[in-house]
Image (spheres, rainbow, N blue to C red):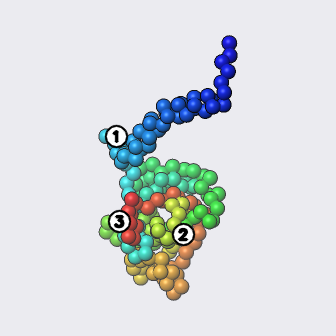
Amino acid sequence: MRFPVSKAGLLLILLGAFHAVAPLRAQDMQSMQRPMTMETPENAPVIPPVTGYSEGERILFLHTETSDPGIARILTEMMGSPVLVVPALADTPEALLARVHVFENGLQPEGARGPLGFQPDIFDHPPGSEGYRPLRKIVLVRWVEPEKARLLRSMEELERAIEAGEITAKETGVVVNMPFLTWPGGQR
């Protein structure tokens, strides 16, 4: 059995349905606008932060994944927290990469050190700069005369040392995901 409904009748039915649902949508929108709180479980894993330098300032960052199994092993041993191997990171287009400079020799300061046991890494493009990318291509740097090494804290200092012939730099093709926790003028 069919019930004929005029166009006007159909419009009234649809408007009635809309009004019945509309208050729920408004309530949903109000609850979505309230600040949400996150609860961290008691036994949630903790990724230890690492110290480095960017733009002359001390920064903190994480190592989470790398394209290279050997680097993953070094970083995992250094941090006591697993760094995962993702070989496909090595295929990341250049436009999506920034650089991290890792020292192979030189100063072995008290406290924070880089993954090879020397001064902390130096990063280009911190958050807030046009070239910030959490994916970093590793550039190995080496003092020509390690006994003359000094602590460097910025790309400008590093570039001057390279131009003066004090340091050599070699691209590795290894990519590491290294999101910043703190940076010059900011933090998460």
Q: Are marks 3 and 2 in contact (CB under 8 Å)?
A: no
Q: In the depicted view, which residue is nearer to us: 161 or 29? A: 29
Q: Are marks 3 and 1 in contact (CB under 8 Å)?
A: no
Q: Residues under labels 2 and 1: Cα distance?
A: 35 Å
Residue that carries the numbered disc 2 in the rendered image? 131
**Residue at disc 1, secondary structure:** loop
Q: Earlier in the sequence, mark 2 or mark 1?
A: 1
Q: In the depicted view, which residue is nearer to us: 186 or 50? A: 186
The amino acid type of the residue labelled 2 equals Gly
Indicate the quadrant where residue 173 lies: bottom right
The amino acid type of the residue labelled 1 equals Pro
Q: Residue 41 has which mark? A: 1
Left or right of residue 161: residue 41? left
Q: In the depicted view, which residue is nearer to us: 165 or 18? A: 18
Q: Residue 112 has which mark? A: 3
Query: Residue 180: percent from the left, percent from the top?
Result: 43, 61
Q: Quadrant of the C terminus?
A: bottom left
Q: Quadrant of the N terminus?
A: top right
The amino acid type of the residue labelled 3 equals Ala
Q: Residues under labels 3 and 1: Cα distance?
A: 29 Å
Q: Residues under labels 3 and 2: Cα distance?
A: 26 Å
Query: Residue 156: percent from the left, percent from the top?
Result: 47, 80
Q: Earlier in the sequence, mark 3 or mark 1?
A: 1
Question: Mark 1: few, some, or many residues within 10 Å (few <14, many ≥20)?
Answer: few
